[in-house]
Amino acid sequence: GYGGSDRDPGRAVASAAVDTATLADELGVDDFAVFGVSGGGPHALACASLLPRRVTRAAVVVGAAPADDPEFDFLAGMAEINLKEFGAAQEGREAIEQELRPYVEAVRSDPNAVLDQIASELPDFDREVLDRPLVRAVFRESLVESVRQGSDGWADDDLAFASSWGYRLEDIHIPVRLWQGELDVLVPRSHGEYLARKIPDAKFDLVPGAGHLLLDHWPEVLAWLSR
């Protein structure tokens, strides 16, 4: 549902494992590592849990924790922009589509203004990263492409996060490493700490003074995955 990709209505986070296995089969790849950032984290972990004979390692950078655990406050510490979005997702499809509609229109008309709005709620660390010309250009292009078909992919994503993921973190038994920014307000520190508690033997790296945009750590992440 993003860009030119087909929509998968009613999908769960676990559905990513099927898609990934299908893609790997088509490419002739037997085993592989997975890397998920932010909302990509739960999808990478789905592969780690459901494809244990094929996934060698899983890296998650500022990855979200489940929203359906009554012992975990999913929304605590989030910036207002995410509080509104995920709060709407927990209310259902009609609410999240209504919440996202003006964002889609704004992205199509003035993506720079949307990026400025997001940046206004972020710590200085993230604003400085987003101010890099190349980073901003890539974010702007990605943002515009993501809503090519409207809000369907975005809404499906949020609804999948807000419901059961379709797998158990406790069932992950491959090497997992988690990177988390100390000052992150999009996916707060508590999410990374939750994942570290639930995933057996996961290694947790807290990045002091950092927020959500840990782009400078990607070489380290990729080096660990390729070992």
Image (cartoon, grey):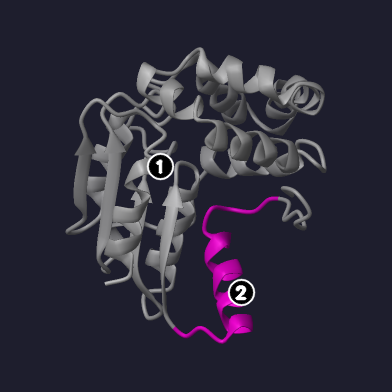
Judging by the rendered image, the residue that carries numbered circle 1 is 215
Q: Secondary structure at mark 1?
A: helix
Residue farthest to the front? 133
Q: Residue at x 45, y 41 (%)?
A: 38
| Disc assigned to residue 155 | none
Above-or-below relation of 154 to 83: below
Badge 2 crowding class, 10 Å Cα cut-off, few under 14, some 14 to 19, many 20 or more, is: few
Based on the picture, tell me whether residue 27 belongs to the magenta stretch: yes
Q: Looking at numbered disc 1 in the image, what kind of residue is underneath it?
A: Leu
Residue 28 relative to residue 214: left or right = right
Above-or-below relation of 136 to 226: above
Residue 38 relative to residue 90: left or right = left
Judging by the rendered image, the residue that carries numbered circle 2 is 23
Q: Residue at x 61, y 76 (%)?
A: 22
Mark 1 → mark 2, Cα distance in angstroms:
26 Å
The main secondary structure of the magenta stretch is helix
Q: Residue at x 37, y 39 (%)?
A: 214
Give residue 141's position: percent from left, percent from top: 69, 39
Q: Secondary structure at mark 2?
A: helix
